[in-house]
Amino acid sequence: MEKIVVHGGNKLNGRVHIEGAKNAVLPILAATILAKDGQTVLTNCPMLSDVFTMNQVLKHLGIKVDFDENKNKITVDASGEISPEAPYEYVSKMRASIVVMGPLLARLGQAKVALPGGCAIGSRPIDLHLRGFEALGAHIEQHDGYVEASAPNGLVGTDIYFDFPSVGATQNVMMAATLAKGTTKIQNVAREPEIVDLQKVLNKMGAKVSGAGTNTITVVGVKSLHGADHEVVQDRIEAGTFMVAAALTQGNVLIENGITEHNLPLISKMKQMGVKVEQERDGVRVIGPAELKPVDVKTAPYPGFPTDMQPQMTVLQLEANGVSKLTETVFENRFMHMEELRRMGANFDIKGQSVIMYGPTHFEGAKVAATDLRAAAALILAGLVADGYTEVTNLKYLDRGYYEFHKKLQKLGAEVERIPIKESDAIAND
Ligand SMILES: CC(=O)N[C@H]1[C@@H](OP(=O)(O)OP(=O)(O)OC[C@H]2O[C@@H](n3ccc(=O)[nH]c3=O)[C@H](O)[C@@H]2O)O[C@H](CO)[C@@H](O)[C@@H]1O
Ligand SMILES: C=C(OP(=O)(O)O)C(=O)O
């Protein structure tokens, strides 16, 4: 086991390279299940533990997967016989594996996937996914911790309305509909850039999907799909995390090839706080001010403020001079990082879905533990501006979504290292 040790106080300066998006590549890997012919070649794939887990899921299904890590390239060949079952060992490691269900059901007329269960940020049910499959004509049964879907005569296109624009349900149902008979219209869908990226891949594979990025997606069913080549879209959450790092440390950082339009809610709030954000030829430049102004933020589905930037944003708000509020509307339990930040000197009250923060904070280095992926990033960010040393443990969460985070921070001038945990420390962390 390892920990990250940060010595705070350095301003970040320089350029940072951003990887392909975790939340785009995972559903795209699931989509490769649909290709009965040919290979799918994905480039700009981030080297993250979640990506390795999804590769394992595909391999378990009988699909050939080759990850050329030097080239960030994954080649998938799903042309042979495949199995309909994704077992608990894999699904429990990563909730996103539930998105294999739509492609399996579409291709095989059946799917058996372990129920993913809850996680640190909330309960995360899959009722919207299942209702979508049922509307397409699938029969659903749940037993022994598994959900089984079957449609022996194939799925049939229909009109579907989601009560909430769930990202995973949108992806799962749009993939299921690609091979359905007739047309499927899905309303109140998620509009995230990762949904747009999935639509691009599906269409390259021969599907007829339109509307991604709006609140209605239309899928005209086709007979079969084939492999395709695709470059995965940039990770807007990794980009946003480095934007916050620059703003927080009074730094000056160029986010290489940053896609401003994917981070508008974050950029708008940072500008209100006094941060300079400028589009340049090579990317987005972020310059942190001497003093941050307080702001109120509310998370919402895209194009609202992303919940995946919420923990990082709370660190920036805590550093601001005055009272800030953050309201979390997407997940019911995403303030776990706040108590760790309290150990570093943060002063705040949690009232229902909101946290009221009293800045500016005099962050002090402490031993803290990550509770989930973005919490891990937030604690490291706080360490960048804390007096003394901050030690962050539970890095398995960080590795789900950030590739060599400490090395990228080092390159920008932070004093940060990743080192093995001594046995005596590990006991304290159990
Ligand atoms: C791999 C991936 O892309 N993960 C992202 C995806 O997760 P994920 O796809 O799981 O997120 P959803 O949009 O589905 O979930 C959002 C909310 O809807 C609820 N819900 C969802 C489905 C359902 O059937 N019933 C239901 O009630 C969830 O409990 C949650 O409160 O979108 C989230 C919201 O932007 C992000 O935080 C995650 O990083
Ligand atoms: C919550 C996240 O991911 P996942 O849905 O994969 O847990 C995230 O990326 O912040």
Image (cartoon, rainbow, N blue to C red):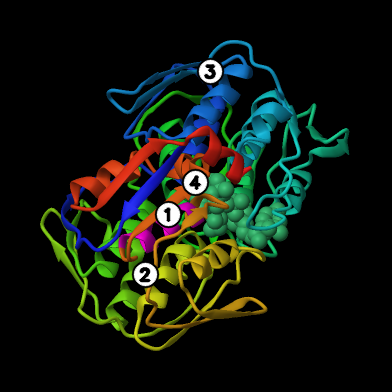
Label 2 or label 3, whichever comes before in sequence order = 3
Query: Can I make out residue 207 in this image?
Result: no
Residue occupying the far bottom of the picture? 322
- Circle 2: residue type: Leu
Circles 4 and 1 in contact, beta carbons < 8 Å: no
Label 1 or label 3, whichever comes before in sequence order = 3
Q: Does the residue labelled 3 lie within 8 Å of ligand 1?
A: no
Side of 201 relative to 71 (left or right)? right
User: What predominant SS class does the magenta segment belong to?
Assistant: helix
Label 3 or label 4, whichever comes before in sequence order = 3
- Circle 3: residue type: Ala
**What percent of the width, then of the height, locates residue 60?**
62, 18
Element at badge 2? helix
Label 1 or label 2, whichever comes before in sequence order = 2
Q: Which mark is residue 377?
A: 1
Q: In which quadrant of the rendered view does residue 242 lie?
A: bottom left
Side of 127 relative to 212 (left or right)? right
**What percent of the width, then of the height, locates residue 196?**
43, 50
Label 4 or label 1, whichever comes before in sequence order = 1
Residue found 48% across the figure and 59% down from its top = 308
As measured in the structure, the alpha-carbon distance from the residue carrying label 2 to the one carrying label 3 is: 38 Å
Label 4 or label 2, whichever comes before in sequence order = 2
The residue under label 2 is 266
The residue under label 3 is 78
- Circle 1: residue type: Ala
Q: Residue 393 carries which label?
A: 4
As measured in the structure, the alpha-carbon distance from the residue carrying label 4 to the one carrying label 2 is: 27 Å
What's drawn in magenta, residue-wise? 375-384
